[in-house]
Image: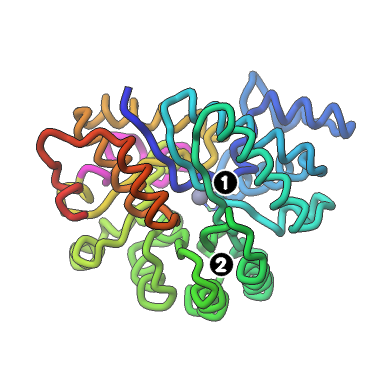
Amino acid sequence: MPIKAELHCHIEGAASPDLAVSQARKYNVDLSALVRDGGYVWHDFTSFLAAYDVVAGLFRSEDDYVRLADHYLSSLARDGAIYAELFVSPDHARKAGLSPEAYIRALAEGMQRAAAKTGIESRMVVTGVRHFGVEAVEAAARFAARSRHPLIAGFGMAGDERVGDMEDFVRAFEIAREAGLGITVHAGEFGGWESVAAALDHLRPSRIGHGVRAVENTDLVKRIADEGVVLECCPGSNIALGVFPSLADHPLPRLLQAGCRVTLNSDDPPFFRTSLAGEYEATRRAFGFDERTLTSFTQTAVEAAFVDRKTRAQLLTRVPKPAARSASARKL
Ligand SMILES: Nc1ncnc2[nH]cnc12
Ligand SMILES: [Zn+2]
C-alpha cells in the first residue's frame, strides 16, 4: 500500500452518508430525498452543489465539526495517509449558524485529535465559494488573512466555475497572498483550458484544483510543466460529475507524460463513492501505474503542501524514495 498525501478535500464534502443521517436525526431534518441506498442522490454539477449545501447545513455546532474532522482524518490515516489539506468554508459555517472563528477552532480540535491518535499532519485551506459572489470570496480572504490560526495555511476558491471571471477575484487572492497564505484555485473542471490560463495569469496560484482541462491546449500544458504548477487531480470526482466519460479517458497520464506535477485527491469522497485510497487503486488499475509512480504523487503533494520547511522535511522522510525517479518526480 503506497504512502499517501491529499491536498484537495472539502471537509463538508467528506461527511459520509451515515454521519449525515446521524446529524439529520440530531437536528430533526428529513434526509430521505438526499440519501438512498447508502449514497447521496444528485444528478449533475448543479444538483451536486445543492446536495453539498444541504449536508454542510447539518453541521451546526463545534462538536459536530470536531467529529467530522477527526472522523475523516482518522480514516485517511488508516488508509496510509501522512498529510492532508482540508478545504474549509467559513460561508458554509455561517449559513449553518456557527461563527467562522468557532468553526476553525472546532476543525483544529478535530485535526489535533486525529493527529494524536494516528500521527496524521493536516492544514486548512480557507475556501471562498465562487457562486456566492466576489464580495463573499473577498470576505473569506480577509477572514483567512486576519485569522493567523497556525493551521490555516492557504486560501482557495471552489464553487461554480461557470459563474463570473477569474479577473473578478484578483483582490481576494492579493489579500491572501499578502498574508503569506499558499494559493490554489479550482479551474479547468467545468471551465475549459481558458479558465486555467486565466487563473494562472490573474491569480498566480502555485497549485490548481483539478486543472485537468488544460489538456485541451498543448501550449498551456507545456506552461504548467515549465512553471512547475501542481495539479490537484481528482479523477473519481471528474468521472462522477461527467467531466470525462470514463477513467480511461481521463487526461492524468497525458499530463504526467508531458511533465506536469500531478497529485491524487478525493475532492468530496462519499459524494463520488470514492476515497483517497480508492483514487490510488483506481488509477493503478486503469493506467498501470507502479508503486514508484504512485509514490511520486505523494512526494509531489508533500513538495507542494502549504507547510513550513521543517514540517515538509519531516514529511518527506516518511515518503519512501523511489529507486529511479519518475517523469513527474524529476520536475521537482
Ligand atoms: N468538485 C467541486 N468543484 C467545485 N466546487 C466544489 N465544492 C465542492 N466540490 C467541488
Ligand atoms: Zn474541489
Marks 1 and 2, Cα distance to the nearest angstrom? 20 Å
Residue on which disc 1 sits: 10
SS class, disc 2: loop
Q: Of all residues shown, which one is farthest toward the left?
A: 324
Q: Which residue occupies 58% across, 53% down?
A: 151
Circle 1: residue type: His
The percent position of residue 147, horizontal first and vertical second, equals 66, 65
- Asked whether 240 or 270 is in front, the reply is 270
Q: Is residue 86 left or right of residue 132?
A: left
Quadrant of the image containing the N terminus: top left
Circle 2: residue type: Val
Magenta segment includes 240: yes
- What's the magenta region? 239-253
Image: 275 above or below 212: above
Q: Which residue occupies 62% across, 48% down?
A: 49
The percent position of residue 330, horizontal first and vertical second, equals 15, 50
Magenta segment includes 292: no
The percent position of residue 250, horizontal first and vertical second, equals 30, 42
Residue on which disc 2 sits: 163
Q: Of all residues shown, which one is farthest toward the right?
A: 28
